[in-house]
Amino acid sequence: MKGATVASRYGGVFVLAVIVAVLPWFLPNSFYFDVVINSGIAAIVCVGLNLLIGYAGQISLGHAGFFALGAYSSAILTDNLGWPPIVSLGSGLLVVALLAFAIARPILRLKGHYLAMATLGMGIIISIVLNQEVDLTGGPDGMPVSSFSLLGQEVDSELGWYWIVGGSLIITVWLALNLIDSAVGRALRAVHGSEVAAQVAGVDTTRYKILIFVVSAVLAAYAGSLFAHYTGFLTPSEGSFFRSIEFVTMVVLGGMASVFGSVIGAAILTALPQFLTVFHDYEHVMFGLVMMLTMIFMPKGLLPSLRNWINKRTS
Amino acid sequence: MSLLEITGLSKSFGGVQAVQELEYTVESGKIHSIIGPNGAGKTTLFNMVTGIFKPSSGEVHFNGQDVTGLPVHELAALGISRSFQNLQVFFNMTVLENVMVGRHLHCRREFLQSLLHTPAITRSDEGARHRAAELLEWVGLKAYVGDHADSLPYGALKRMEIARALACEPKLLLLDEPAAGLNNKETQEINELIQQISERGITVVLVEHDMRLVMGVSDHILVMDHGKKLAEGTAAEVRENPDVVAAYLGRGD
Amino acid sequence: MSSELLQFLLSGITVGAIYALVGLGFSIIYNASHVINFAQGEFVMIGGMGTVFIASAGAPFPIAMIGAVLLAVVIGISLQKLAIERARHASVVTIIIITIGASIFLRGLAGVIWNRDFHSLPAFSGEQPIHVAGAVIVPQSLWILGVTVAVAVALFVFFNRTMIGKAMLGTAHNPFAAKLVGINTNNILILSFALAAALGAIGGILIAPMAPTHYQVGIMLGLKGFSAAIVGGLGSGPGAMVGGLLVGIAEALAAGYISSNYKDVVAFVIILLVLFFMPSGLFGSRASERV
Ligand SMILES: Nc1ncnc2c1ncn2[C@@H]1O[C@H](COP(=O)(O)OP(=O)(O)O)[C@@H](O)[C@H]1O
Ligand SMILES: [Mg+2]
């Protein structure tokens, strides 16, 4: 029993690490690097979001707001105030953590559709502010972001970014798996299963919901900050309602309550539109279809369904 | 010594007086039962004692302390646990994990340590896993330990809820209709389980419709009707109480 | 009352009426199925864009309007039959994602099949503004208000005086009892989607002469209609009407007195405030969970 959980925890991380380590040798050009880096960034958001939605059972339709706040904090603090990128990143995370904490208590009292709507409203408010505060953000036209530097070393190569994002993703996944397989993680899943039963077992459900909301927001902001420096240019669409829905769809497609599912979901939905540019006009049509079809025919998502299927075949 | 003391406790939902001016004392170490027709207010009483509902008026004292209106998880920490009439199972977890959640307060759960899964966390988790497995074996669910909760039959889920409640190491255990929907053999097993729980020094309050179970196992019985106390006493006293006889026989229950 | 204030109120009531129609659609579907249909805004878009394109194919406007409403109704029914019904027992999150998926799908399709330009419909009866106490009102506003009132009255009669209407309310309060007395709940669900789609489309047609329609208009109009339903109390018909007017007026006042840039924020701030402090809205009721 003990061996099994430890093995599954580290086995998966190991496989992910190996894939990240060897993948660069199989990426033929910078287009592929770009797709993989963007997938990794989305995956970081989705792992956090899955902790909130898949594990703790609290939906958010506004996490792109946190992603964008992380991105814009980094952009504004480094470019307008001249702060070192790493300090801007840290400050951005702190701001987002405080904001998420402030809003978490009233918002997480809500359930189901009400929670969905409130998080959606929150995300849209953030996105409207980013669009309107032209002096700060450049408004709908966007703003450039200076490059990232780490330990005095400017990160300017695709490969550099690849390692930063890959490393961040591995660490995120590892931390998430650790958390899930602890009393805190069980408490979060219990909140999803039955809130009153969790409370009767001694779980301060409000506290845990706030905790995981903040954690997922901070992860989204971290990914947003990386994204800002990596792409070098930001527009408010990074915080749009559609972007929030994209993140949720990645989580759901990969599999609720499946950390690796989120990585796969993020990779598929980031890559697909890039490789299907001939269908560019149909991007939204396809996106909508994927959402509906997965939810109708495979509500558990790709990875859990695959696992079930394999279990059935082998037993 | 009284473990739980309820004075003037009332709860209304809109116009419905679910519990009215109830006075009730639970003695430490005994098995208590609450009987009464559906809608008598038994579950509502449990919900107030466990903090799920705030009373409209009245007080609840536990272990000499005024606990009226405390949040549910704080009451859990003080030693009150329960099972549910309508199952409240974590269907997104395995049977073992369900019971491990019951160990929540006994586990290390510092956030940063959990993120890193430090040896201290691993050790505390192992302890919880071990204890949960033991309890599952004790309630007779050894065969299901690793299964997913959603694959269990109804009777097993009822027992799993008891194991989960016991995992909290409560002083007071409230069981809301643990034998409802069970067959004779299963009811008999629940009966034995309740006695074993009591032998471990845990005070039990049982809500149950199965009169054989109630009369056989209880040291004290409270009869409720329309949110009020109709009678209380030992099984023999209650059985002979004219109000109870009238209420039960008159209604033909 | 200053004429400026009156002007703001008039324009607030006009858009508020549209929000009310969309909000009514949300409430009708919620009542019948406890589903929030995030695709509700797309019916508004289909109403406007549908009329534009059917008319451009040569149909006279009244026919084009009826055609667009029917198109929305057919799509609404398909949504219920093909997607929602199959996920009947799914979790709230699942259903939310299905209806959001449907909205993105429909929007995408509209962008491809029709186009991504802005289109206007001609006003129903001229553009000559009418002066009232220093404020002006365009005839289309009167159309919007008149049609909304007519729809509200019709719905009131339908839900309170007809068997089928009462049955729809019955389904909302107790699906099991509805089944017992022989009401086919499946038909009720279909009917509620059809009705909601028609309401949305009517709203979309009414507003198109005043605010150009576009394949993406459904997003904001849908969300604001939702905020109307929330303010009034989810599931309450009169609530949605009052909620729509309140949101419309608040928006117009904010645009006039505070900043038109932040006009769109108003509806969402209202959603948050209502959810935080008055979660059952003005007229809604919410039962507590039993354990
Ligand atoms: N959450 C609630 N909301 C409204 N009424 C309730 C609620 N819980 C219980 N009631 C009402 O309170 C009364 C007592 O119910 P309950 O405590 O469940 O009775 P019992 O458990 O004895 O069958 C009943 O009339 C019931 O309808
Ligand atoms: Mg009961």
Image (cartoon, coloured by chain):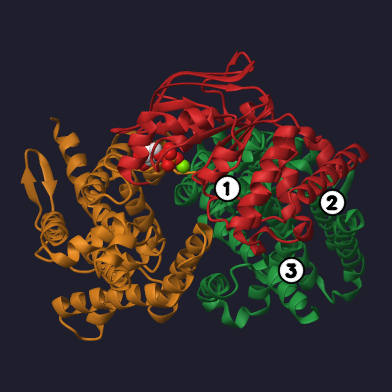
The residues bearing labels 1 and 3 have C-alpha atoms spaced at a distance of 22 Å
Give yes or no for contact between labels 1 and 3 (Cβ–Cβ under 8 Å).
no
Instruction: Tell me which chain appears green.
Output: A
Q: Residue A36, relative to residue A179: is it above or below? A: below
The crowding category of the residue bearing disc 1, from other C-alpha atoms within 10 Å (few below 14, some 14 to 19, many at least 20), is many
SS under mark 3? helix
Q: Nearer the viewer, mark 1 or mark 2?
A: 2
The residues bearing labels 3 and 2 have C-alpha atoms spaced at a distance of 20 Å
> Which residue matches tag 1?
A65
- The image quarter containing residue A199 is top right
Split into 4 quadrants, where in the image is the N terminus of chain B? top right
The crowding category of the residue bearing disc 2, from other C-alpha atoms within 10 Å (few below 14, some 14 to 19, many at least 20), is some
- The image quarter containing residue A184 is top right
Between B126 and C50, the residue placed more toward the observer is B126
Sequence-earlier tag: 1 or 2: 1
Q: Is residue C242 left or right of residue A89?
A: left
- The image quarter containing residue A101 is top right
